[in-house]
Image (cartoon, helix red, strand yellow):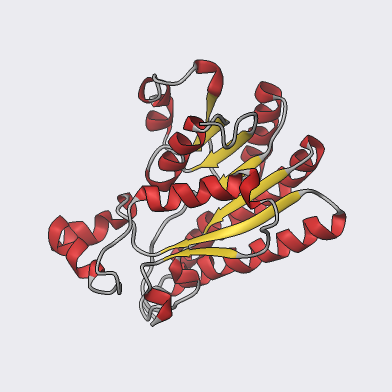
Amino acid sequence: MTRVAGKVAIITGAASGLGYAATIKLMNEGAKVMLSDINEDVINSMPERLNDFSKSQFSTFVHDVTNEDSWIELIEKTENEFGQLNILVNSAGISLGADIVSTEFDVWKKVHQVNLDSVFLGCKYAIPKMSKSGQGSIINISSISGIVAGWNTAAYNSSKAGVRLLSKSVALYCAKKGYDVRCNSVHPAFVNTPILDPIKQAFGADEAVAKLARQIPMNKIGDTDDVSYAILYLASDESKFMTGTEIVLDGGLSAM
């Protein structure tokens, strides 16, 4: 269980969903992790939830990913507590909005602030620390919606597509500078996390999952392990020649 031993990671959105799954996976494989989330009550309960791990293996930070000063503070706290930074998992995200005509401008801006601006800020401030640490891997959680559009997800499509291209730009920047810092994006289709709660409330949990599964050639939705194993691979030295690309986890949806 040492695939990322000796490495230090920041994971945003770490209190639930894909972020929490990534936290468990990386810590099980030896990483030290700074857990970031805006949900203060939940992030403050993480020591109790993670009581199987050494208290020296993780720390927590209440973090608004849309706030530049908060990012600066998070990066500095990570370096001060763990001495280095090797992995950034930009997992925080929201799914709001509707079709282009129905989407309010405030909603459009909020979705892009959380889903895309936060990735920009994280990359901007993590890269100098990673290059100083000697190596780094930035893993940006996008979505299949960043590759395949939906008629009623204008803001989400735009923000997640932006994450995909921003990740490529970051990868090329780091390569040009001679930094051993990689950047890739991960694109899941429907995964059983709290982001599906609105559709579960609308249709009932079982029918919602069945409805989503019918859109997938494999006739099932993903689970958090499907994504956290991909994150672990990208975080480890096993992917040391992989940068500027994406891992698509969609049960065949984008092949249609």
Q: Decide if residue 102 is on the left or right side of residue 115.
A: left
Residue 100 seen in this snapshot: no
Image coordinates of residue 48 in percent, x first then y, are 37, 20
Q: Which quadrant of the figure contains the C terminus?
A: bottom left
In the image, residue 240 sits, relative to residue 199, either above or below, namely above
Q: How far across and how far down the image is residue 67, in percent?
A: 60, 45
- Residue 242, quarter of the rendered image: bottom right
Compare residues 100 and 215 and report the one nearer the observer.
215
Residue at 38%, 25% (x, y): give it: 45
Report the residue at 51% width, 54% height from top. 114
Q: Is residue 58 left or right of residue 48?
A: right
Name the residue at 20% across, 58% down: 200
Residue 209, quarter of picture: bottom left
Vertical arrangement, residue 19 with respect to residue 245, above or below: above
Q: Is residue 242 above or below residue 58?
A: below
Query: Residue at point 47% right, 36% down?
Result: 23
Q: Position of residue 182 (x, y in %)?
A: 70, 53
